[in-house]
Image: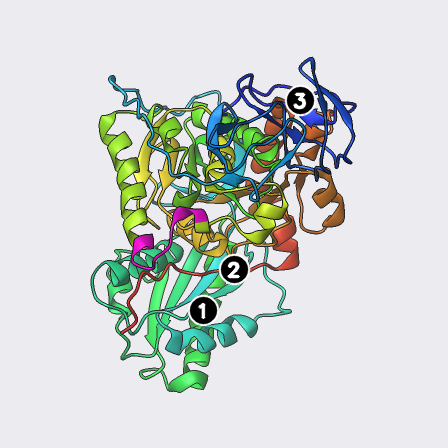
Amino acid sequence: MLVEISRLPNAGNAAIHLHPTDNVAIARVALPAGTELRVDGLPVLTRDAIPAGHKVALWDIAAGETVERYGQAIGRAKVPIDAGRHIHTHNLAFEELVLDYEFPTTEIPIPVARADAPTFLGYARQDGRAGTRNYIAVVAASNCAAHTVELIARSYEGAEMPPHVDGVIAFPHGEGCGHAFGPDMDQLRRTLGGVLVHPNVSAALIVGLGCEGNQIDHYLGLGVGANRLVGMTLQGSGGTTGTLEAARREITRFIEQASSEQRVPCPASKIVLGLNCGGSDSFSGITANPALGYASDLLAALGGSSVLAETPEIFGAEHLLVRRARNREIAEKLLGCIRRYKEYLARFQSSFDDNPSPGNKEGGLSNILEKSLGAVAKGGTSPLIDVYEYAERVTAAGFTFMNTPGYDPVSLTGLAAGGCNLIAFTTGRGSAIGFPTVPVVKIATNSHTFRAMPDNMDINAGSISDGASTVQQIGQQIFDRLLETASGRRTCAERLGHMEFVPWRIGPVM
């Protein structure tokens, strides 16, 4: 966590002061103009209406003076700001910071699995990983096969699956041809390959047209036997109808095989947890993200893996991760992700500050610096053990990072393809998203969203800002729910049938 927040001010306190050096406080509830506040003994009279989650100036701030939240700079005042004024995009300027990196000078050991670790009921795989679900996956090699894989999976709708089989799931997408061969095609293949041999997948089909750039032969060479992976093309299987019939014959065999696989006790160290946020608001960095960070620390201490993602949403806060890196090499690897992503954005005349959405800003986040400082709290306080490229297989125990976009469906796809068998997703605005074969536990940052979207939210971290719970209590609740989910408890996203799958297309389109 960026700030040690054990218990926030009680429910009677209308504003939250996160760090002694902060010259702003966060409105816990909507504050009309003329509200009398007392923040850490300092009297403040609001001169503007302050929406819930937004910032109020605690004292006069001169034009050009730094504005701080979490004890970190989040921009400069565009104009003089009087105490009690609302601080947001109208008077706070984004400024790319020159950060002082504190590189590690020693080697931090990698966590090891603990013999006394709690367990969950999962599917033990031959490669040593553990599944939290048991699906049959039908994956398109290209857009030309996307409709067919959907038809194949749809043909099982309403069919009763035998015990231990979670279903037949399609992975359609719009890629696989018109790619430049090189990094773009390599990344797609890494993504689809990760889905095909995922621990939550008992067996899979890769289906192509036959003439696309992304040939199915690449996947058949992954070293997985015919009992887990089969390929076919429309051109070689009699077109759409013939491929549907051939696929169903293979799936009949796969279902019979999957039905013989049973859940067995697996140590928590077998959990690979993706950490993601979407539809963030100002409460994200106060409630749900620090609580998820606490759960991430619990998992890392047991020798499990947690994977922070979304490169644009660590920008401006990367120095906090650098100082926690296992060694100098890992720190430089992380900074390399930032540097290359910045170059990627520059090709499209964009910047990291284009990341915050209108919803983020309505929720009180003024710029990417403020958003990132709250987002990295999902990673807790554990050492940063390794850094991975998009959809690269996660193998290290402990807290790690994956280079993904901030766009949620693409980020979740990268995490899942990297082997995450669970994903924890914090949201302030109520992002409704899931993944076809990986359970996504949704954690609301505020009680309003939790109450407004009860079918979408699994856990309410808003009770922290309500003064009813501590970060540690909600963090433990998240950890316990993760074990229950890994053992088969369905998430809201699963019950609603969310199937978002969007590979990251680098470009160009040929």
Which callout, 1 or 3, points at the residue further toward the start of the chain?
3
Q: Is residue 118 left or right of residue 174?
A: right
- Quarter of the image for residue 99 reads top left
Would residue 113 be counted in the magenta stretch? no
Q: Amino acid at mark 2?
A: Glu
In this view, the mark in front (1 or 3): 3
What number is the disc on residue 210?
none
* CB contact under 8 Å: marks 1 and 3: no
Mark 3 neighbour class, 10 Å CA radius: few under 14, some 14 to 19, many 20 or more: many
Q: Residue at x 51, y 27 (%)?
A: 68
Q: Residue 376, how many percent across, how many down?
A: 46, 34
Task: Find residue 171 and report its horizontal and vertical position in percent.
Answer: 45, 65
Q: Is residue 467 shown left or right of residue 214?
A: right
Q: Which residues are magenta?
A: 345-353
Residue at 36% in and 60% down: 192
According to the picture, the residue beneath numbered tag 2 turns out to be 500
Label whose residue precedes the other's in the sequence (3 or 2): 3
Q: Which mark is residue 8?
A: 3
Classify 48 as above or below 59: below
